[in-house]
Amino acid sequence: MKQPRVLLVWPRVQTSDPTAKRLKVELQDLSFARGYRVENFVWSETQSVAESSRKIPLVEAWQAHSLYNMLHEGPCAVWLFGDPRVTRNVMSGPSTKNSMSLAHLLRYKAYVASVSRTASTAQFEAEMTSFETWIREINCTGHRDPRALPLNTFDSDFEWLDLDEEAGQEYFEHHHGTATARMDSRRRHWAVPSAAHGGQAMYISGTTLPSGFHWDVQAAPSPSRLFNLTQTWSMPRDSYLNVGPNGHVRSGQSSSKNSAKIICKAPNPNAPEEPKNRSKGRRGRASLEPGRRRRR
């Protein structure tokens, strides 16, 4: 098992706040004393809600993507300063309906705690002790457990706040079927393939899944759209997608005319800049890359 990590998620507006800085330093010291790795996520994006002049705190899509990926690498405790949200569908504008609480996104993949401005050292130490207990527990039993799903991508009419309880899992299966016949609210089948494609072995709350595990998501009877934290995919009939527990999506039918495709992607602020236009060749066309020829 990898070294446990503590992720401190706090708003940029608090980076100069003396109280917030003191709390952050105290959490860092307690984490280092226990041998944990510490990483800071400072979020700053605040968007207007489409249906009103009110604003909501919204974590940038690629930052949320990076944070969510980390939870599948080893045990993590996430300390939230404030109550930020993440966008559900990057193709649509920000709104309360088109976003979900970051705490809800993370709840089954990490140990999540909220930081109060009045928190004491004793409270922090108690939470750290709870995290140590959580690390030793099995909070996800494997790929059949609905808590393994990327619940921001698995479309459902419910929030599913009680999947840690047996009754909650039974109710989930009542609405979406068992692991061998699982269907989301868009009538897409989430099938477990007979063989994985290889790749990362993902960790989820005490359980390590087989290397390269994913779901084959079969299209609904009518065209639909599937979302993860950074992309919106169009799924025609007869198409399918491979979806990992961390929400990573890739097309399953690249050669088919009915293959699914990305129709919107959130801008990545950390992506390298696009190369500038190459020098023009004859007739104003861009010159070819070295080693390539045009067909005659």
Image: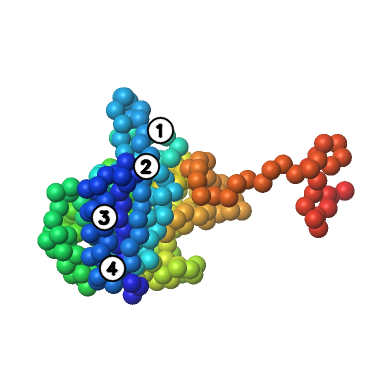
- Foreground disc of the pair 3, 2: 3
Q: CA distance from mark 4 to mark 1?
A: 40 Å
Return the residue at label 3: 24
Secondary structure at numbered mark 3: helix
Secondary structure at numbered mark 2: loop
Q: Mark yes or no: residue 144 visible.
A: no
Q: First in sequence: mark 4 or mark 1?
A: 4
Q: First in sequence: mark 3 or mark 2?
A: 3
- Foreground disc of the pair 2, 1: 2
Return the residue at label 4: 32
| Image x and y of residue 260, in percent | 52, 47
Return the residue at label 2: 44
Return the residue at label 1: 93
Q: Which quadrant holds residue 216?
A: bottom left
Q: CA distance from mark 2 to mark 4?
A: 26 Å
| Image x and y of residue 132, in percent | 20, 69
Q: Mark yes or no: residue 9 visible.
A: yes
Residue placed furthest toward the bottom: 1
Q: First in sequence: mark 2 or mark 4?
A: 4
- Foreground disc of the pair 2, 4: 4
**What is the number of callouts on the image?**
4
